């Protein structure tokens, strides 16, 4: 029976080539979208899931209450990891981790910049980063040992074997002995690094504040023993910081480490939308595109039922039962889906490199067990979804009526078919609106006046001799041709996270709590960024020592309720400061967030990054001058710089990828919808050929016939627009609510999207309508 069904399937392909082509293109395109999105979703869901202790691996966070919200601060005190392990028997392993930032490693005349970590010895028991060489039990026997990645070992030594005992120099003159080599860190790890140094070295060489309970500089990770109830454990550690500091506003809690990547709502005290939102969004988009493709199959199969009337009638007259006919049409549907899936896999293989480039992934098309299972599930769901309605519809036709060659379509069937077309264009219109709004919001983010000038600013680390005499170095940089000004800052002005809640000011209530961003800077930094001073002045060498002066932004002054703030004094950690200036508010974070209170303090010795403003039109000259000077000033070091505007744009990398991917998927949804519309328009024109011929004989023009044939589909698309635009308004409004600063939802965005959907649909239908209207009426009448 199966062989018989397949034989009929291939005969029908030969007989109805146009219908087959439309179905195969629509289904294969839809399935290719589903497969690409599924690969991306699986990759996102797999981040950090490879650790052996995944189910028991937690990160410790502080959860202060600020402005009525519970925040999660992942940075904790430097002593916390080892102290918790000593006092809580529920803990099997614990480690503290501190990022080193990019550092220069040297071996003879070879040097590379690499990203590292300071970590406790149990780091390799907490995380599953396999060692190729070395013993994890003794790997940090000395504070001047270093564990390097396989890739870093090959870069320095040409191999990963036989490098234990070799030495590398970190920075200026600190020697480290290689005690282990790690497998390269997987791409699906949220922690990326090239080397690990013992935490003992950080303890000994960092400032005393690093091991002070009042300073949060370290991230702490725990593996709990089996059977430990996490709720009970959180209750036990909640007040731990209060017992050490006396501060009740630093409660501790834990969160599952592998949830951080997808569900991290608060990162670095800043509210973020977790990536799970995008996983759900694209999963929904893939399902909707598949539904659109399946709707095409349903519509074309039921619309073309008249071509199979005699086949159905004869089979029923010969005694075929309905379940046999149902199985026949389901086999046809599954066969069509199987062929489409093969084509879709080929499309995915061809497009995957470009998809990886857009999504910033390294996804491969790997036919492992779970992928094959997923393909099988997609095949069955798609085949049954696309074929179930046609199968039950065709098998239910009356045998006598079908043998007469007549098909009486009920109002319900017509309504269902039109409803499916409307549903297709509802989804397509929503996608078009979404793409347009995302694009406009990202454009707004890139062009908005931020309150400082980010253009033509390059920044680079302070290294080598520049650290020893920073003032001389900056003065020399400012003298270079093409450089307008230069200064230094502790952390990048964009997205930096250095905060305090310990600032005291006149009139502050005892229980009042506020988070201030701190920006330690050098002289001339505010001028380099062209930040407006609205009251007072900037830091200046003309006034002598300025270390006891402080400059706030307008939001900070408003929060403190200070009128005439210039000259008033505030204190931080037993240090008094005099307010000498107030700046206009500027966006030092992304537009997702409202402008927060911030202050500048003059601390040249704390600065780590040079910011250089380049004169407009002289970028190439200035960069060449900077590189030559830097490499002469720091022999052996490379001039590694970045542009500030690129760093600012990187804050919207996730949204940018969503925008690009959504644009392609919206285009494909429209394409698939129009394929179905094209097939229906073609069939409609064929079915009404006699009517069209009579109308033309009676005097109707080709234009009138074209409008008549197009109007039916135009009404369906207009109905779809009326349904889609309110839904789109709600959806994009919810997305925009994640931005503190956003575009207004003008009506023309929605009218434009609707017009695009209508225009594309009418072009699709209009071509077939014009062709039918210009057909010779004599031929149409002769056939009857």
Image (tube, rainbow, N blue to C red):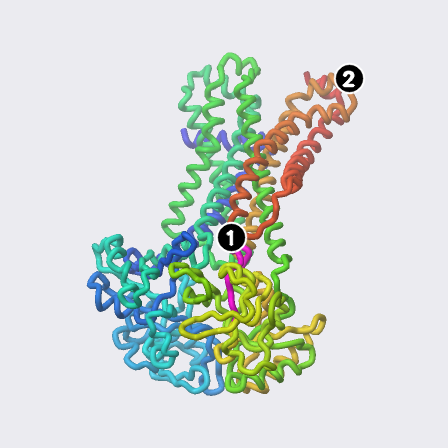
Kindly tell me whether residue 608 is visible in this rendering. Answer: no
Residue 784 is a magenta residue: no
Residue 595 is a magenta residue: yes
Q: Quadrant of residue 219?
A: bottom left
Element marked by disc 2: helix
Taking the spot 78% from the left edge, 15% from the top edge, the residue there is 698
Taking the spot 54% from the left edge, 53% from the top edge, the residue there is 655
Mark 2, Cα crowd under 10 Å, few <14 / some 14-19 / many 20+, is some
Using residue 590 as the reference point, say whether residue 701 is left or right of it.
right
Taking the spot 66% from the left edge, 41% from the top edge, the residue there is 748
Q: Magenta stretch? A: 590-600
Residue marked by disc 1? 349
Asked whether 360 or 347 is in front, the reply is: 360
Using residue 140 as the reference point, say whether residue 320 is left or right of it.
right
Q: Quadrant of the C terminus?
A: top right
Asked whether 480 or 189 is in front, the reply is: 480
Using residue 456 as the reference point, say whether residue 662 is left or right of it.
left
Image coords of residue 346 (percent x, y): 52, 49
N-term mark: 1 or 2: 1
- How far is mark 1 from mark 2, CA to CA? 54 Å
Image coords of residue 720 (percent x, y): 59, 31
Q: Quadrant of the N terminus?
A: top left
Q: Quadrant of residue 134?
A: bottom left
Element marked by disc 1: helix
Image coords of residue 454 (percent x, y): 62, 66
Dominant SS type (magenta): loop
In the depicted structure, whether residue 576 falls above or below residue 362: below
In the depicted structure, whether residue 583 falls above or below residue 470: above
Indicate which disc residue 486 carries. none
Indicate which disc residue 697 carries. 2
Using residue 341 as the reference point, say whether residue 64 is left or right of it.
left
């Amino acid at each position: 029976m199966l062989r018989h069904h397949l034989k009929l399937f291939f005969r029908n392909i030969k007989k109805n080539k146009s219908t087959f082509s439309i179905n195969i293109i629509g289904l294969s395109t839809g399935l290719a979208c589903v497969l690409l999105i599924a690969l991306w979703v699986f990759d996102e869901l797999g981040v950090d899931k490879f650790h052996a202790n995944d189910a028991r691996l937690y990160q410790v966070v502080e959860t202060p209450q600020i402005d009525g919200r519970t925040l999660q601060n992942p940075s904790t005190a430097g002593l916390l990891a080892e102290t918790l392990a000593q006092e809580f028997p529920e803990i099997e392993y614990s480690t503290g981790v501190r990022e080193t930032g990019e550092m220069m490693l040297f071996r003879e005349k070879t040097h590379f910049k690499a990203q590292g970590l300071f970590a406790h010895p149990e780091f390799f028991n907490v995380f599953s980063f396999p060692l190729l060489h070395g013993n994890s039990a003794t790997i940090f026997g000395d504070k001047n040992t270093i564990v390097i990645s396989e890739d870093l070992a090959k870069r320095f030594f040409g191999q990963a074997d036989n490098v234990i005992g070799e030495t590398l120099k970190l920075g200026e003159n600190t020697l480290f002995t290689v005690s282990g080599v790690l497998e390269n860190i997987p791409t699906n790890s949220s922690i990326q690094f090239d080397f690990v140094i013992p935490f003992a070295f950080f303890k000994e060489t960092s400032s005393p504040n690093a091991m002070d309970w009042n300073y949060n500089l370290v991230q702490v990770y725990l593996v709990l023993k089996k059977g430990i109830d996490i709720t009970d454990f959180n209750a036990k550690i909640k007040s731990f910081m209060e017992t050490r500091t006396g501060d009740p506003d630093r409660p501790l809690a834990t969160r599952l480490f592998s949830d951080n990547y997808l569900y991290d709502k608060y990162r670095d005290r800043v509210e973020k939308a977790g990536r799970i939102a995008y996983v759900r969004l694209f999963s929904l988009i893939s399902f909707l595109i598949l539904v659109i493709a399946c709707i095409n199959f349903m519509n074309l199969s039921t619309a073309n039922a008249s071509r199979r009337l005699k086949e159905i009638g004869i089979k029923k007259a010969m005694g075929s039962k309905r379940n046999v006919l149902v199985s026949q049409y389901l086999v046809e549907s599954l066969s069509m889906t199987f062929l489409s899936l093969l084509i879709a896999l080929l499309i995915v293989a061809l497009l995957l490199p470009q998809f990886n480039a857009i999504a910033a992934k390294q996804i491969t098309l790997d036919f492992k067990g779970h992928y094959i299972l997923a393909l099988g599930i997609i095949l069955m769901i798609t085949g049954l979804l696309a074929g179930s309605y046609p199968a039950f519809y065709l098998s239910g036709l009356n045998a006598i009526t079908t043998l007469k060659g007549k098909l009486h379509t009920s109002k319900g069937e017509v309504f269902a078919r039109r409803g499916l077309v409307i549903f297709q264009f509802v989804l397509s219109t929503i996608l078009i609106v979404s793409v347009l709004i995302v694009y406009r919001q990202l454009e707004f983010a890139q062009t908005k006046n931020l309150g400082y000038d980010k253009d033509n600013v390059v920044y680079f680390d302070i290294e080598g001799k520049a650290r020893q005499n920073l003032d001389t170095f900056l003065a020399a940089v400012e003298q270079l041709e093409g450089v307008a000004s230069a200064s230094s800052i502790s952390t990048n002005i964009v997205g930096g996270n250095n905060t305090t809640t310990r600032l005291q000011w006149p009139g502050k209530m005892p229980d009042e709590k506020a988070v201030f961003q701190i920006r330690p800077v050098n002289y001339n930094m505010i001028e380099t960024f062209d930040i407006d001073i609205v009251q007072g002045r900037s830091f200046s060498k003309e006034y002598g020592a300025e270390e006891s002066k402080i400059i706030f932004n307008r939001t900070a002054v408003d929060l403190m309720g200070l009128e005439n703030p210039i000259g008033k004094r505030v204190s931080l950690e037993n240090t008094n400061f005099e307010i000498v200036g107030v700046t206009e508010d500027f966006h030092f974070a992304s537009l997702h967030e409202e402008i927060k209170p911030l202050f500048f303090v003059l601390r040249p010795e704390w600065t780590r990054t040079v910011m250089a403003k380049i004169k407009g039109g002289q970028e190439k000259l200035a960069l060449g001058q900077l590189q030559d000077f830097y490499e002469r000033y720091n022999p052996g070091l490379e001039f590694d710089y970045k542009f500030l505007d690129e760093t600012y744009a990187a804050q919207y990398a996730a949204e940018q990828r969503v925008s690009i991917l959504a644009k392609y998927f919206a285009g494909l949804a429209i394409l698939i919808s129009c394929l179905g519309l094209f097939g229906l328009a073609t069939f409609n024109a064929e079915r009404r050929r006699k009517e069209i011929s009579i109308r033309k004989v009676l005097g109707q023009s080709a234009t009138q016939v074209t409008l008549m044939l197009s109007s039916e589909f135009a009404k369906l698309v207009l109905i779809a627009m009326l349904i889609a635009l309110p839904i789109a308004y709600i959806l994009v409004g919810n997305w925009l609510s994640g931005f503190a600063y956003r575009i207004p939802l003008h009506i023309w965005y929605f009218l434009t999207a609707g017009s695009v959907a209508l225009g594309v649909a009418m072009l699709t239908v209009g071509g077939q309508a014009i062709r039918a209207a210009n057909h010779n009426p004599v031929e149409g009448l002769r056939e009857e």
